[in-house]
Every structure is written in C-alpha cells, then in structure tokens.
Image: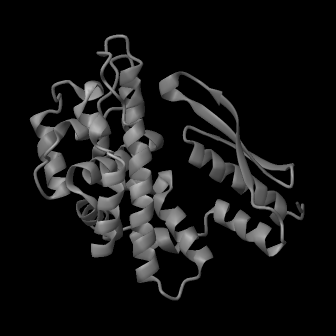
Amino acid sequence: MLALEKFWKKLRSLIDLGADYSETSYRTECALSDETVAHLQQLIGEPCSNLLLYQTALTHRSVVHDPATPCLIESNQRLEFLGDSVLGMLISEYLFKGFPESAEGELSSNRAKIVNSKSLAGFARSLQLGDHLILGESADHHKIRSSESALADAFESLIGAIYLDKGIQAAYDFVIRHIIEHVNFKTIVAAEHNYKSRLIEHTQSNHLPPPLYTVITETGAEHEKSFTVGVSCSGQLLGTGTAQRKKDAEQLAAKEAMERITAGWSA
C-alpha cells in the first residue's frame, strides 16, 4: 500500500480534489445528527474530520430538486463518481495480489461482480446506510431508503468521502472491513461471471470489435431517472437494458445480448 499511497498523494497534489468542499458550494453548517456521526465514525474506525464531506455522501439527489432545499446543497453524485474510481482501483489491487493465478479476464469479471450495484447495495444494507440518507421532503422516503441504486451510490460516495477526508489507506481499510471481510464476499466472487465481461470475451474470441454501449433514452424526474442503454458490435444492436443506473442498464443490455448469442444468434 505504500506505493499506492504515494501515487494517490501525487495525484491529489496535481488535482486538488478536496478544494470544492471548503468553497462556496459547501459553505453550510453540517446537518448530520449525532447518531449518524457516531455511526459513521464506528464504520470508519476513527473520528470524521470533515463532516460536510460525509453529509454530502449521504445526500440523495432528491434533496437538490426539492423546492424547500437551500440552493447550496449538493447531492452525492460527484462523490459517487470519485468513490467509484477509488473503489475500482482498490478492488483491482486486492484481486491482483490475492489471485495471482487468475488471468486478466477473470480478474475483470470478479471486480465487476464485487462493484456492481447489487453487491454494493448489499454492503450498504449491512452498514444500515439507508437509515442515514438525507432525502428531499417530497421524495418517497421508504422507496429510496431501500433502493438498490440509492444505496449503491451512497456506498461509493462514502468511500469517496473517506478518501478525501482520511486518505487512501483509510479507504482501503474500510474496503477490507466492509467488503473483503463481508460474510458474502466469497459467494459474490464465486457467482457466475457478469454479462459485460462475458460479452467482451465473446467478441475477443471471435475477433470482433469491442462492444459499444450507448444511452438511448433518459426518462423520469431528475432524481428518479431511468436509463435505457443499447449495446452494439460492428454497428449492429445486440441488446438493450433499462435501469436507474447506467452501469446496471449496461449489464442488462449485455445480458440480453448474451442470451441471444447463446440461443444461436451470432454478431
């Protein structure tokens, strides 16, 4: 982890990822309850230094689009973007070191199974993150607190917040405790390969161009969007999928494509 720590320190020196969290868009008092702060600190294993980061990590996008919300409130979407990258890199390192006999395709497949929304939502439920989400007043609270999409986003956002607040080692420790050591981790890794990886393997083995994923439509309110994604190869549509997260829609599109290929249709 030492080399990894140096890499991320250098990256942050080139790109001041934490700057926005002390500037205008975050110039507000922390609204987290004492119960939520205590819960977060228990999960992280040490006190939270920048509580506004964690408040943002738990803020669902329904808050931003609620008329009663102050204009300076930001949802966890940007932190989810960062957390997704940090988590992907940490899981990649763990798999690379922990499975030395695995080829690139198997490593990619296992990583995708660990970081997909279903798995992340399961980890989030284990941490009871849904109970601590900050939601818009007019939002369907019960639906969102149990939503796979909302929970997966919050989990990745929390990793992003930990990284910005505590550094890469703290983020790695969190991943070890709450993913690698999770009771379902081995079951997740042993599950069937994910469809996107299977589709890539199919195109490679048949000397075809890599699959291309394209958003076909976006529907619904800003905080409850649904994405329909199509996957194509050599200009031919292979399958489509619809979900609240683009990554999940891509998986569903790849699933449809693989089902058609398995049934005898070839690209």
* Identity of the residue furthest to the bottom in this view: 101
Residue drawn 77% across the image and 55% down it: 257
Would you place residue 118 above or below residue 185 in this image? Answer: above
On the image, the x and y values in percent for residue 195 come to 66, 61
Looking at the image, which is closer to me, 181 or 267?
Answer: 267
The quarter of the picture where the C terminus appears is: bottom right
Residue 41: percent from the left, percent from the top? 14, 50
What is the quadrant of residue 146 in the picture? top left
- Extreme top residue here? 67
- Residue 141: image location, x then y, percent: 36, 27
Number of marks in the image? 0
Asked if residue 177 shows in the view, the reply is: yes
What is the x, y in percent for residue 38? 11, 45
Q: Is residue 111 above or below residue 244?
A: below
- From the viewer's perspective, tell me whether residue 54 is left or right of residue 205: left
Residue 1 seen: no
What residue lies at 55% left-to-right and 41% top-to-bottom?
Answer: 245
Q: Quadrant of the N terminus?
A: bottom left
Residue drawn at (33%, 18%) of the image: 137
Looking at the picture, tell me which residue is in the foreground, 3 or 99: 3
Q: Is residue 24 above or below residue 215?
A: above
Along the horizontal axis of the image, is 32 left or right of 237? left
Image color mode: one colour
Note whether 248 is above or below 97 in the view shown.
Answer: above
